[in-house]
Amino acid sequence: MSLCALCDEDLAEARVVGTTAKPGKASRRVICPKCALIQLDPMPLEQELLDYYATSYRDEYGLPVLTLSTGQCIKPDHPQYGEAWQGMFRWRAHRLVNALGLQPGDRVVEIGCGRGELLLELRELGIEAIGYDPDPAAVEHAESLGLVTFVGSLEDATHERERIFHDTFRPKACFSFHVLEHIRDPQFALSEMAEIAPLVCVEVPNVINMGDNPAAFWHHVHLFDFQPATLADAFHQAGLVVMGMESPQDLMMWGAADPDNARELTVERVGADRLADAIEGRYERFEARRDALALARWLQSPPSTGEMRRVRSALANVQKQYDKSERLFSEVLDGLATLSRSLNEKSSEDVDSAFDHDDFLHGYQVGKAHALGRTSEMLSHLANALGIARDING
C-alpha cells in the first residue's frame, strides 16, 4: 500500500496525473487527495537512487535548452551556451544572496553542488562555500576550479558536521537547488539541512508553473512535484518556519527553525481535484494543438493523390474566405472525407509508401492515423487549427 509522503494518506484511490516523463520513460504519478502532493508511485528503492546518481544521472539528464536575453532558445551545441549556462548560476547566486541576506565572508553549504557552478559564482560575491555531491566526476571537476567539495550525500554532510562545520566552518545557510524532489524523505532532508545551518533554502520545480505540456515537465527520477503549499508542509514537518519564497518559474523557499522576529509566510493551497483537473486540461489542450499542427504539416506535404491536391488547393483559401463562403469550407470537409475514404481502401504498405517523404515523425504518425479512419477527429482538429469555431459531428 502506498502512502503520501507528507500526510500518510492512502493513495490507493489517488488520481493518476502522469504516466510518462522525460526522457520518454514510464513514470506513474499520483496526487494525494488530502494535501495535493504529487509523487511517483511506486517509489524506487534508496539503493537504486544512490547507484543512479553516482553513475548515469548526469549523462541521462542532459543539459537543458536555455533562453537568451533576446528570447532566443539555444541548445548545448550553440556557441553562446557556455556563457548562458554560467549566467544561470550567476542569477541563482544573486537570488540566494538577496533572499538570505548573505554578506561577504558568510559561509554556506550546498547539497548537490554538481560541478561547482553555483559555488564559483558565490565565491565571486565573497561568500565562502563548500559543497557535497554524490557524483565523483562532478566533484573532481569542482575541485579543479579550486573549490572545496566532497563526494557524498546529505547524510554524509550531516554526519560530518561536527568535524567540519562547527569546529572550523560555521555556516550561516545550507541550500540546495533542484535536489529535494529527488530525495525519498523530503521532510527529513530539510531537518538534516537545519542541523547543518540555521537558514535553509531549497529550489524545486513548481508544478503550478509546469507549462503547456505536462509530459515535458515530469522527470522519471523526480520523486515529488511540489506546489508552494506542499513544499511549505515539508518545511513545517521539518520544524522550520517559512520566511519567504519566490517563483518566477521554479519555486525557491527559505526558512529557519528559530527565526528572529520572523512572520510565518502564508501560502495558498491548490486542492487536489482542482490541480488534477488543471493538469488534465493542459494535456488535452497540448494534444489538440499538437495534433492540429501535425495534421496541418501532413496536409501541406507534397500531394500524392488527386484528393490531396483538391484539399490543399481549398486550404490555401479557406481561412481568408471562410467568412464569405460556407460552400468553400464544405468543399474542404468533403475533400478530406474523400481522402480519408480513399486511403482507408489502400493497404498499409501503400499508405507507408505515400508518406515516406514526411520527415516530421509525429506528423507522419498522427496524419496517417487520421487518414486511416479517424475522419471526425481529423476534421475537428483541422477546424481548430484554422481557428474556425464550428462543431463537426462527422
Image (cartoon, rainbow, N blue to C red):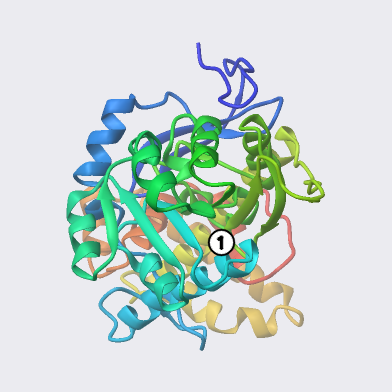
Total numbered labels: 1
Label 1 element class: helix
> From the viewer's perspective, is residue 1 above or below residue 89?
above
Question: Depth check: 162 or 17 in front?
Answer: 162
Question: Depth check: 19 or 111 in front?
Answer: 111
Question: Depth check: 340 or 301 in front?
Answer: 301
The residue at 47%/46% (across/down) is 218
**Picture coordinates of residue 322, whole percent (x, y):** 70, 78
The residue at 61%/23% (across/down) is 14
Residue with the mark numbered 1: 289
Residue lying furthest bottom: 70
The amino acid type of the residue labelled 1 equals Arg
The residue at 31%/57% (across/down) is 114
Question: Depth check: 45 or 64 in front?
Answer: 45
- Mark 1 nearby-residue class (10 Å; few <14, some 14–19, many ≥20): some
**Picture coordinates of residue 31, whole percent (x, y):** 61, 31
Q: Is residue 250 rendered to the left or right of residue 357?
A: right
Q: Is residue 97 rendered to the left or right of residue 63?
A: right
- Residue 209 occupies which quadrant of the picture? bottom right
> From the viewer's perspective, is residue 181 above or below residue 286?
above
**Residue 199 appears in the figure:** yes
Q: Is residue 373 rendered to the left or right of residue 9?
A: left
Residue lying furthest front: 167
The residue at 42%/40% (across/down) is 182
**Picture coordinates of residue 101, whole percent (x, y):** 63, 66
> From the viewer's perspective, is residue 14 above or below residue 57?
above
**Residue 307 appears in the figure:** no
